[in-house]
Amino acid sequence: MTEITHSMTPPDCLVAMMVAVSASDENLRTTELVTIERIVNHLPVFKGYDQDRIRTMSQVVFDLFAEEDGLDALFGLIRENLPERLNETAYALACDVAAADGELLDNEIRLLEEMRFELNISRLSAAAIERGARARHMS
């Protein structure tokens, strides 16, 4: 019997996107991890979500990032398991995590651009989402 190793719920997909942007610079910052936990604890889309799944989804992302085409595989899983109506939510949460430490590094910017493309987020929507994230994390 073959076990499905990557069955992901929509909230799992959102967590994976947040972890991916945090891991994109190969340095998971505490502020980013705390932001992910805070988001999962407070947003309605995560109602009833098992906090332990954050660790599981993190490991999925790390395993995929260790593969040559891991980012493409991650986006494939997201496309298969995330309803289109949550695409902007996924991008907004990724932007919040990227902005959490007060600086955007080149790897994070490139990954957000790729996410915007893969999630089919319009330029106007992306600009509004990015501006909102910047405003929420201004010091």
Image (cartoon, rainbow, N blue to C red):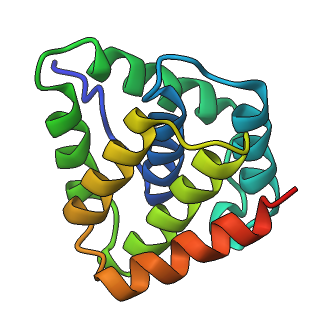
Q: Residue at x 33, y 15 (%)?
A: 63
Q: Residue at x 73, y 39 (%)?
A: 101
Q: Residue at x 20, y 26 (%)?
A: 70
The residue nearer to you, when weighing 13 against 52, is 13
Q: Quadrant of the C terminus?
A: bottom right
**134, above or below 114, in the image:** below
**91, above or below 27, in the image:** below
Q: Is residue 48 left or right of residue 79?
A: right
**Which quadrant would residue 51 be assigned to in this image?**
top right
Q: Residue at x 23, y 73 (%)?
A: 120
Q: Position of residue 37 (x, y in %)?
A: 76, 42
Q: Is residue 18 left or right of residue 45?
A: left
**Which quadrant would residue 55 be assigned to in this image?**
top right
The residue nearer to you, when weighing 44 against 35, is 35
Q: Quadrant of the N terminus?
A: top left
Q: Residue furthest bottom?
A: 124
Number of numbered discs present? 0
Q: Position of residue 73 (x, y in %)?
A: 17, 35
Q: Residue furthest top?
A: 66
The residue nearer to you, when weighing 3 against 136, is 136
The residue nearer to you, when weighing 49 against 91, is 91
Q: Position of residue 103 (x, y in %)?
A: 64, 42
Q: Position of residue 124 (x, y in %)?
A: 37, 87
**114, above or below 108, in the image:** below
